[in-house]
């Protein structure tokens, strides 16, 4: 006979009937009933148990049983029969336990074997890496020596750059002093221009009384402005009627002077003049609007300059193309 599974049961004697209460699935119920019948115990009825046992435990199934003589079976007989379920159940539990334990130990052994193989592989790799590392150390030492040599060259270059920087800063300070002096000259020239503008205004007020006198004064004003600009900007040559535009068309010449200072002193570049090679253009305020135009180019360290307005732009560009 095969091993019987463990069964949780309770033998309950109620009044004139005897009940075997048990837990498990329906197959377990059928297995117990067959076993009782084989041992001459009749199973009168069976089904789902609706009431708890006298012990207070609620079981899933009930079997109403009787002996062959129709009397209640002796409890000792029932317990002896059910002991086969209990004892064989414990043996089965032990077998399952040992089987599980054996499987667990086998799995651990396989894991340990895999780990040992992995460690052996890692050891071989480490030995190989150590050998390669020794060779790399020799190469790195050679590279390090080369880096030290390059570092020494770099430090020498830094020292030379430091000396160059010192010279550059000295020259820059001299240029700054020159710029400040030129700014002061520009300020003085602007003050002079303001005074000339006032004089020009007075002269214009006298235009109705003496046109000849006005023409002479305007000519003298142009000469004065030319003299001032020649002293202030000796390397600038004004083209066409630039001086007349400065004295007669500009309400405020300071923006023009600042613009020329940016070109000559700061080496500032303008925008290219389309169609006029080598000529550049800068725009400035006339004191009334922003229609002032300054065209310039560098010829043999000399700045050639044309001062005009937007109204004459087409004519001025045609002139620049020809020279």
Image (cartoon, rainbow, N blue to C red):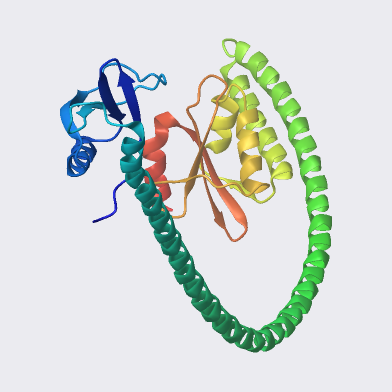
* Quadrant (top left, top right, bottom left, bottom right) of the N terminus: bottom left
Vertical position of residue 206 compared to residue 175: above or below = above
| 294 and 67: which is toward the camera | 67
Return the residue found at the far left: 44
Percent across and percent down for residue 244 are: 56, 32
| 103 and 173: which is toward the camera | 103
| 87 and 179: which is toward the camera | 87
Q: Does residue 92 appear to the left or right of 172 in the view shown?
A: left
Percent across and percent down for residue 211 are: 57, 18
**Residue 6 in view, yes or no:** no
Q: Residue at x 64, y 16 (%)?
A: 201
Return the residue found at the far front: 69
Percent across and percent down for residue 221 are: 66, 29
**Residue 189 in view, yes or no:** yes
Vertical position of residue 62 compared to residue 275: above or below = above
Q: Residue at x 17, y 33 (%)?
A: 68
Counting the numbered discs, the total is 0
Percent across and percent down for residue 232 are: 72, 42
Q: Residue at x 66, y 41 (%)?
A: 261
Vertical position of residue 312 compared to residue 322: above or below = above
Q: Does residue 235 appear to the left or right of 274 in the view shown?
A: right
Vertical position of residue 11 compared to residue 169: above or below = above
| 141 and 244: which is toward the camera | 141
């Amino acid at each position: 006979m095969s091993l019987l599974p463990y069964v949780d049961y309770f033998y309950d004697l109620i009044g004139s009937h005897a009940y075997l209460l048990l837990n498990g699935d329906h197959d377990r119920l059928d297995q117990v009933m067959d076993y009782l019948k084989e041992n001459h115990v009749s199973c009168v009825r069976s089904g789902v148990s609706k009431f708890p046992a006298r012990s207070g435990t609620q079981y899933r199934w009930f079997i109403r049983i009787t002996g062959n003589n129709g009397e209640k079976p002796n409890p000792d007989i029932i317990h002896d029969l059910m002991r086969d379920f209990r004892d064989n159940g414990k043996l089965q539990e032990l077998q399952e336990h040992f089987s599980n334990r054996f499987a667990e130990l086998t799995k651990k052994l396989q894991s340990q074997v895999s780990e040992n193989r992995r460690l052996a592989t890692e050891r071989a790799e480490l030995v190989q890496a150590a050998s390669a590392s020794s060779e790399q150390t020799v190469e790195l030492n050679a590279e390090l020596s080369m880096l030290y040599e390059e570092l020494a060259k770099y430090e020498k270059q830094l020292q030379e750059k430091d000396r160059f920087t010192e010279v550059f800063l000295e020259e820059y300070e001299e240029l700054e002093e020159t710029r400040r002096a030129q700014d002061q000259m520009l300020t003085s020239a602007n003050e002079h221009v303001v005074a000339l503008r006032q004089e020009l205004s007075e002269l214009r007020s006298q235009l109705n009384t003496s046109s000849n006198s006005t023409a002479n004064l305007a000519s003298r004003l142009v000469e004065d402005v030319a003299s001032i600009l020649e002293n202030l900007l000796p390397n600038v040559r004004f083209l066409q009627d630039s001086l007349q535009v400065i004295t007669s068309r500009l309400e405020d010449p300071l923006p023009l002077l600042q613009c020329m200072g940016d070109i000559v002193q700061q080496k500032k570049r303008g925008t290219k003049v389309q169609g006029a090679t080598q000529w550049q253009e800068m725009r400035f305020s006339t004191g009334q609007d922003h229609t002032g135009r300054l065209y310039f180019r560098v010829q043999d360290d000399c700045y050639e300059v044309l001062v005009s307005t937007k109204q004459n732009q087409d004519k001025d560009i045609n002139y620049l193309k020809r020279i």
